[in-house]
Amino acid sequence: MMTIISLLLLASLLPHLTFTAHVNVGIVNGREAHYRPYMVSIQLNKQHICGGFLISAQWVLTAAHCWNSSFSRCQSLTVVVGALDLRKSNIWNHIGVKHCIPHLQSSTRPYRNDIMLLMLYQKIHLNNNVQLIPLPKGGEDGTANRVCSVMGWGRQWTNGSPSARLLEANVFIENKQKCHYGWGDEYIDSQMICVHGSGGSCEYDSGGPLVCGATAVGITSFGDLSNCNSRLKPNVYTKISAFLPWIKKNMRYVK
């Protein structure tokens, strides 16, 4: 699963809206997700462009590269909550975005500080289908070989079609040496996690969570554009625990 309005407009905007170089975050070899109430679809002109997840009744966490201020207004984005199948989403679960807060030092060449908060126009009503996901405590990132999960509405294989239904796949936290071997200096251990597995993220999955246990420990960030779910270049996720002070500060002071 990785980063996902007419077809012509989408084709012209996609390089600016989401990834450049290697961003390649649909769920490959995934299965249908039946209950992920914290998961949201971030949309532009009613077209899915990225995933995200609810961390409070008015805040969504996602990847910074999912929005480019040069090509669209933040207020043009909407967030769809409580949906498993995007073809069946209702007007009531489309929420407008009031503020986009990307990390001020975020970049895509190379990827750094790939994290963004979205403040919704209104607090959402939590129910069985719409819930929050906890963030990690400091240092709670998942040890090597721990089984976690990733999810999204992205491409189901390299150059394949995005999925209308939310898909998920199990992945394993990769050891640091293999992350560095695959990505070299592009991988920064202090702010990134990489994973491997028979399934994984692809284009349009960007911004979705890496979930270990019941906790969101990572944000889908980048991968090998030429080969979704490459074993040689493991998919990379922003390490949420490294940004907890930044998250708390912005949620406290932005109104």
Image (tube, rainbow, N blue to C red):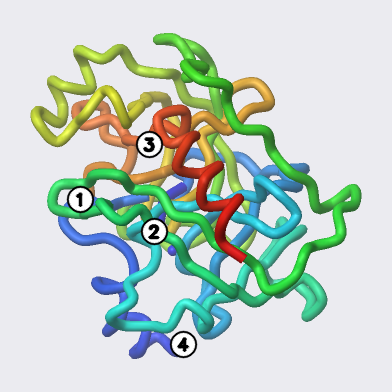
| Residue type, numbered disc 2 | Pro
Of helix, strand and loop, which one carries label 4?
Answer: loop
Foreground residue among 149 and 161: 149
Q: Would residue 162 appear left or right of 222 to someone viewing this image?
A: right
Q: Which mark is residue 22?
A: 1
Residue at x 46%, y 34% (from the top left corner):
240
Dot 3 alpha-carbon crowd within 10 angstroms: few under 14, some 14 to 19, many 20 or more: many
Between circles 4 and 3, the one closer to the viewer is 3
| Earlier residue among tags 3 and 1 | 1
Between circles 2 and 4, the one closer to the viewer is 2
Of helix, strand and loop, which one carries label 1?
Answer: loop
| Earlier residue among tags 2 and 3 | 2
* Residue 85 in sight here: yes
| Earlier residue among tags 1 and 4 | 4
Q: Which mark is residue 102?
A: 2
Residue at which label 3 appears: 237
Residue 175, how many percent across, how many down?
Answer: 30, 12
Q: Is disc 2 in contact with disc 1, using a CB cutoff of under 8 Å?
A: no
Q: Which mark is residue 5?
A: 4
Q: Would residue 186 appear left or right of 152 to someone viewing this image?
A: left
